[in-house]
């Protein structure tokens, strides 16, 4: 997928006197299989004009991603440059409610570099110079990760065995005019449900579901299998590939157990605060359905 609401741009909203414009970008941060229009790595894409000036930016209620970076112009000359950019972090509960000017010059880089023609743009990975104290707020990811048992795993749409992967969705609210009320400090509840046909495992653990739970504090996972077996739930705390390099998964407390045929097993994770929740299963014969439901909340 790609820029989902491309039929109605921010310029359209400005021309109609609308106070706020919403941005929806699917497949956000996918380096391994980026969207054809370039919106997976930055918005706008490199070469496209920047966005008009706005009075504020906040994470929207439908966003599965909990953070991003905004690049905009300070409209001031520094170090002999005509324009100097400013990179600001935006996350759930921490919007950027200040004037953010944009020159609408073409975007030149897919990372918030601090020197980008004064363009107002959104990023999912900062340049190395903006990784302060070894910490990155990036959400850009590749195709590999290391499972909690140390085995190399495949992440994203290339996942094996018919595993289900839900791509990250970025939902942003751009305030063209200052809002009368402050943005909501949390997102709407996230609800997911899907099923797959189990692969004959023969005692080998199989990846089943990869679900974005960025920054969610409470995550409830329900697993139902037609065939008896076992399950395990893991989480990836941080997808950002600039500061981390290798993406690691960790187990969660009480996150594994027995699958009774036809019954539902639940794992409740409190204080989760991880980017992705991973669900695995092990069955003998395969060929029957495994269903996973995830409910996640910001509190």
Image (tube, rainbow, N blue to C red):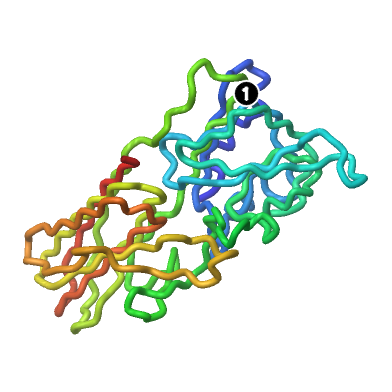
Residue under the point 60% across and 59% down: 133
- Rate crowding at label 1 as few (under 14), some (14 to 19) or many (20 or more) other CA atoms within 10 Å: many
Residue under the point 54% across and 53% down: 137
Q: Position of residue 29 (x, y in %)?
A: 54, 56
Residue under the point 51% across and 72% down: 246
Q: Position of residue 189 (x, y in %)?
A: 31, 39
Q: Quadrant of residue 17?
A: top right
Label 1 secondary element: loop
Q: Is residue 208 left or right of residue 248?
A: left
The answer to whether residue 102 is above or below residue 45 is above
The answer to whether residue 65 is above or below residue 235 is above
Q: Is residue 221 left or right of residue 297?
A: left
The residue carrying mark 1 is: 176
Quadrant placement of the C terminus: top left
Furthest-right residue in this view: 80
Total number of numbered discs in the rendering: 1
Q: Position of residue 218 (x, y in %)?
A: 28, 47
Q: Is residue 173 left or right of residue 160?
A: right
Observer-nearest of 59 and 41? 59
Residue under the point 56% across and 57% down: 136
């Amino acid at each position: 997928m790609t820029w989902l609401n491309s039929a109605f741009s921010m310029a359209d909203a400005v021309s109609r006197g609308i106070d706020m414009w919403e941005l929806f970008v699917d497949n956000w941060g996918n380096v391994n299989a980026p969207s054809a229009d370039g919106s997976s790595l930055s918005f706008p894409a490199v070469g496209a004009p920047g966005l008009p000036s706005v009075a504020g930016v906040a994470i929207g209620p439908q966003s599965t991603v909990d953070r991003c970076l905004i690049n905009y112009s300070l409209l001031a000359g520094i170090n002999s440059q005509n324009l100097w950019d400013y990179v600001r972090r935006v996350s759930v509960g921490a919007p950027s409610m200040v004037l953010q000017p944009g020159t609408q010059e073409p975007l030149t880089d897919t990372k918030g570099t601090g020197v980008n023609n004064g363009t107002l743009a959104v990023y999912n990975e900062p340049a190395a110079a903006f990784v302060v104290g070894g910490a990155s707020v990036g959400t850009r990811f590749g195709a590999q990760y290391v499972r909690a048992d140390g085995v190399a795993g495949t992440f994203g749409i290339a996942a094996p065995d018919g595993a289900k992967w839900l791509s990250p969705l970025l939902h942003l609210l751009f305030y063209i005019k200052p809002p009368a009320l402050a943005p909501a400090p949390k997102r709407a509840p996230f609800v997911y449900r899907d099923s797959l046909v189990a692969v004959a495992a023969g005692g080998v653990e199989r990846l089943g579901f990869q679900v974005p739970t960025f920054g969610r504090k409470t995550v409830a996972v329900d697993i139902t299998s037609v065939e008896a077996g076992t399950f395990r739930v893991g989480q990836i705390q941080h997808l950002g590939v600039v500061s981390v390099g290798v993406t690691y998964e960790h187990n969660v407390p009480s996150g594994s157990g027995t699958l009774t045929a036809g019954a539902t097993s639940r794992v409740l994770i409190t204080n989760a605060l991880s980017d992705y929740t991973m669900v695995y299963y092990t069955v003998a014969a395969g060929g029957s359905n495994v269903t996973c439901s995830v409910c996640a909340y910001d509190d």
